[in-house]
Amino acid sequence: MVQIKGIGFTKVGEFWEKTFEDLLVEAISKATEDANLSFDAITVAYIPRPISPHITSTDVARVVRSILPKCRKIITIDCGTNGLIAVETAAREAGNKENVLVVGVEKLSDFKSYEQESIRMNLLGIHYRLLGIPASAVHALLLRMYMKKWNAPHENIAKLAEITHTHAAGAKHAKYRFKLPVKKILASPVLADPLRMFEFSSLSDGAAAVILSQGKTGVIINDVKIANDSLFVLNCSDELQAKNIAEIARDIGTTDVDFVELHDESTILGVLQLEWTGISKLGEAHKLVGNGDVELGGKIPVCTFGGLKGRGDVASINALYQIAEATLQIRGEADNNQVDNAKSGLVVSLHGINLSAGLCKIVKV
C-alpha cells in the first residue's frame, strides 16, 4: 500500500516578487517537514513538466537536485495538465520501499491574457489547434450542448463557480478568497457565448509537493488510474459521455467517497465530471449543483478548497494541490473547509478536453 507521508504547497497567486526556485524550496521544505523526513531521506523525485514556457524541466530538476543531494533519481514526466500521470508512476516506485517526492511548479501569471490563451490552446487536441479555436470556445460549445440536451438552466451550471468561490473564501492558500454570487457570474463578460468570464479558471503561480512511501496506515492511495479519451465537440453530436473515464471510475469505485476534488477548469467541465465519474446520473449533475448538494455540508462536497476556479489554476500541478487538499480533509486538518467525518475522497485530473484523465481514490486506513 502507498501512504501519503507528507504534503507541502505554497499559496496560489501572482508572485511577481518570487522566483520559481523560491516556490519550489518552500513546497519541498513544507512536505519534508510534514513527513518528518530530512532532505537526505528522499531517494526518488518525479517532476510534472511545467506548462510555463519559460521554465524548463531541466531548470526544475537542477533546483530539486540542489535541495536533495542524496536523491539518486530525478525524472520528468510529460503530463500536460493531468498531474496524476506523475503520481501514478511515483506510486509504483513508492511500493518498492522508497521515499518518493512528486513536486512541480508553475509561474503562469507572468504572461499576458492573450499569451495565456495561446498556452491553453496548446493543451487542446490537434483538431482544435489546426482550426485555431480557443479553449474558451470549446468549453462554450460543451455548455451549449449540455444545456440543450438536458434542458439545463444556465444558472444551475454557473452555480458551481459560486460554490467554489465560497469554499475558496475559507482556504488560506486560495487565490480568490471572496464569495461570488451566481447573478454576478452570469452578468460577467462573455468569453464565448454562452460561457461567461467568471465561469472559467485563471492560470496562476504556485508549487506543490507530495511525498509517497510504503505504508499500511494513515492516508493511503487506494487506487490511481489513467484513461485516454476523446470528447470531440465539433462533430455536432450531442454525445457528452466519456466512456473510458466511466470505466476506470467503476474499477476504482466512486460511489462511496465523501468528497470530490474536480478539475473545474470551467463550470461545465466540472458538472460533466460528476456524471463521467458516476457521482451523478447522466443529465442530473446540474441539479445536484443547483440544489447546493455539492457545497460543504451537502451530500457530496466538491472542490473543497475552491478548486481550479477559486483556489487558482496551476496547470501541471493541479493534481498535487488536489491530493494535498484531500489529505488534509482525511486527516481532519481542513479547518473552515472540513468535510464532516471524511474517510475517502476522489481526485479528478484532466489534460485538455479529456485527452487524458486520471482518477485517484484516497482513503483513511
Image: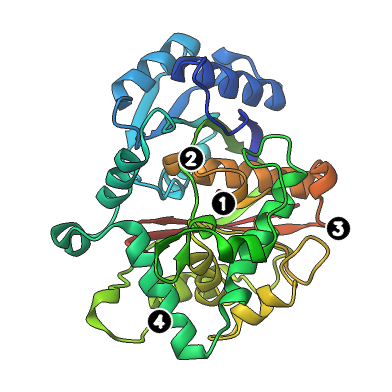
The amino acid pointed to by label 2 is Val
The label on residue 314 is 2
Residue for badge 3: 340
Residue for badge 1: 309
Q: x, y percentage for residue 137? A: 33, 64
Q: Secondary structure at mark 4?
A: helix
Residue in view at x 55 percent, y 33 percent? 97
The label on residue 145 is 4
Q: Work out whether residue 192 or residue 156 is closer to the camera in this orientation and state it.
A: 192
The amino acid pointed to by label 4 is Met
Report crowding for label 3: few under 14, some 14 to 19, many 20 or more residues within 10 A (C-alpha).
some
Q: How many marks?
A: 4
Could you give the CA–CA distance between mark 1 and mark 3, rounded to whole angstroms?
23 Å
The amino acid pointed to by label 3 is Asp
Tag in front: 1 or 3: 1
Could you give the CA–CA distance between mark 2 and mark 1, rounded to whole angstroms?
10 Å
- Nearest to N terminus: mark 3 or mark 4: 4
- Nearest to N terminus: mark 2 or mark 1: 1
Tag in front: 4 or 2: 4
Residue 252 showing in the rendered view: yes
Could you give the CA–CA distance between mark 2 and mark 3, rounded to whole angstroms?
27 Å
Q: Secondary structure at mark 1?
A: helix
Could you give the CA–CA distance between mark 3 and mark 4, rounded to whole angstroms?
35 Å
